[in-house]
Image (spheres, coloured by chain):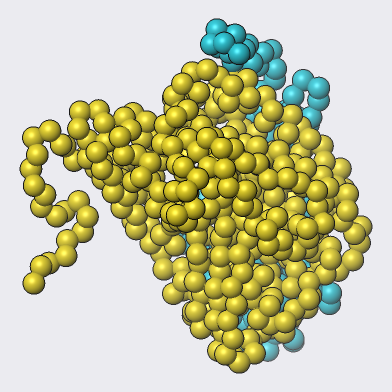
Amino acid sequence: MNTATGIIKALNSGIKHLAIKRFTLRYPEEKLKFVGDGYQFDPSTGVGIAGYKGRHMLFHDHCTGCQLCSIACEGVAEAIAMVKVPEEYKHNKKAIMPQIDYGKCVFCGLCVDACPFYALYMTNDYELSSFSKEGLIYTPAQLQVKPFVSQDSEIKITDRGATHG
Amino acid sequence: MTKELLPGLALQKVDERIMTLNVGPQHPGSGHMRIIVQIDGDFIVACDPDPGYVHRGEEKMAEYRNYITNIPHLERPVIHDSCNVLYPYVLGVEELLGIEVPERAKYIRVIASELNRCVYTMYWLAIYGIFLGHSTMFMWPAGDRELLIDLLEKMTGARVTHAHFVPGGVRNDLPPNFEDVCLRQVNYFEKRIKEYAAIFYDNPILIARTANTGVLSREDAIRLGTTGSVLRASGVDYDLRKKEPYDVYEELDFQTNVLKEGDSYARSKIPWLDMMESCRIIRHALQKMPKSGSVRVKLKPNPKGKGLNSVYKRVESGRGSLGCYIVSDGKPEPYRVKLSVPSFRNLIALPYLLKGEKLGNMPSVYWSLNYWPVEADR
């Protein structure tokens, strides 16, 4: 192939894309949809359930204050601290629950794997930015709240290229 | 007693014609490293790569963490290729602890690591494009990479640093309906990367820029101990997926790509050809994968190695052969973890390649070595 045809072919291959819809996710307006409600773990089988590893969710009625999540995090990020909570549940004798510092968390999900009581899961929420360092520390009461997410955009593939529809 | 000085700080004999130039460590072209180049006019006389600016002590950190909590930080050296970086460690720990991995988990691992190889290569290709001033080639791979990142996100739950492989299998099973989505997006991805031929790889301007620059002969490539795409671009057919098949690679149908030229162009073309092979591997693996079954062996909470024992495992990563040497002394923590990384091996070839080249060719030759500074420093 000589130089002229090569250059024309290269230009042509780029110009074709003027007519094709752009493959761009317009982020704050549209958000990608994830599988499921976030990463979960089933201690009875020892296998996780696929999902996005975002902000955690703590089920107060399951948590026994056993500290296994905190111990698992010690070798990773030291993001989980056990804090005092009002005595409400009989199974949580020490009345302690995890408090997670998202300034340190790396979202590996090993704390979810460590929990034998179905108490700690992850959710699809990833918008955790805060103006202060203290704002990144989520108390057990904040972790209890189920996040509101509106993620509905998916990759669609047609003959004329892929788009975020 | 002579005092040892860091390279670049040592006093040198002044030559009127030779100028020393520091490229990096804060240069968009060099990454987190410095290349000390001595130039005579426009031609490079000598070159001294100076890595080590992003040393993070991964190997020492691994001695204080147990076999499971080592996973998140050992994949940090190359976050785009995190499954492949973790692969030899996981294979090694499995041998140390004597774990048998379920068949389905092996296939999931192969799919994840091939997707990861493509994601890494697309990122690398985007940077290679911008190094050559080809901004379309920066935008296209960076965009098309999203297709595979989306698949990995569905599989593992994270865009990068997946922490998906564990000794004994993978963390979670594939999500429902994954096979169809994967097949559709991988097929489209393959169609897209074939379009790169016209605009980039067959582009006469690119060929004029990169062909016959930084030629590494077959003998030199073997002598210097290079691996991966650098070695295969110099005409040596060496791919660990073929030579030392791990997990289920020996059951899958693919071939290795070898080019004879050994120049910057050939080195940049090999990863692109490898991506098409990766698409073939993914399709074949999806077809052959057992449709159901366990994906993870249940381990004891704090697994221990059996006595004084050591293991060395290596895999073919996006950059070349990546090895992991683990010594266990019967405690929950490994006694020593040593990563033998392809980036550092390929960097050794840089001074030989740049001698006599023009300074303008330096970025393309440097990046064609498939070098990742953070991985080389560990």
B44 sits to left or right of B55: left
Residue B166 location (% of width, % of height): 68, 69
Q: Residue at x 36, y 35 (%)?
A: B362
Asked if one can make out residue A28 in the rendered structure from this viewpoint, the answer is no
Instruction: Quadrant for residue B148, please give it.
Output: top right
Residue B24 location (% of width, % of height): 30, 44
As rendered, which of A5 and B151 lies closer to the eye? A5
As rendered, which of B362 and B235 lies closer to the eye? B235
Q: Residue at x 20, y 28 (%)?
A: B41
Instruction: Quadrant for residue B118, please give it.
Output: top right
Q: Residue at x 25, y 28 (%)?
A: B42
Q: Considering the image in quadrants, where does the N terminus of chain A appear?
A: top right
Q: Is residue B74 above or below residue B60?
A: above
Q: Considering the image in quadrants, where does the C terminus of chain A appear?
A: top right
Residue B134 location (% of width, % of height): 48, 24
Q: Residue at x 51, y 74 (%)?
A: B337
B137 sits to left or right of B360: right
Asked if one can make out residue B198 in the rendered structure from this viewpoint, the answer is yes
As rendered, which of B70 and B258 lies closer to the eye? B258
Image colour assigned to chain B: yellow
Image colour assigned to chain A: cyan
B115 sits to left or right of B54: right
Q: Is residue B290 above or below residue A27?
A: below
Instruction: Quadrant for residue B240, please give it.
Output: bottom right
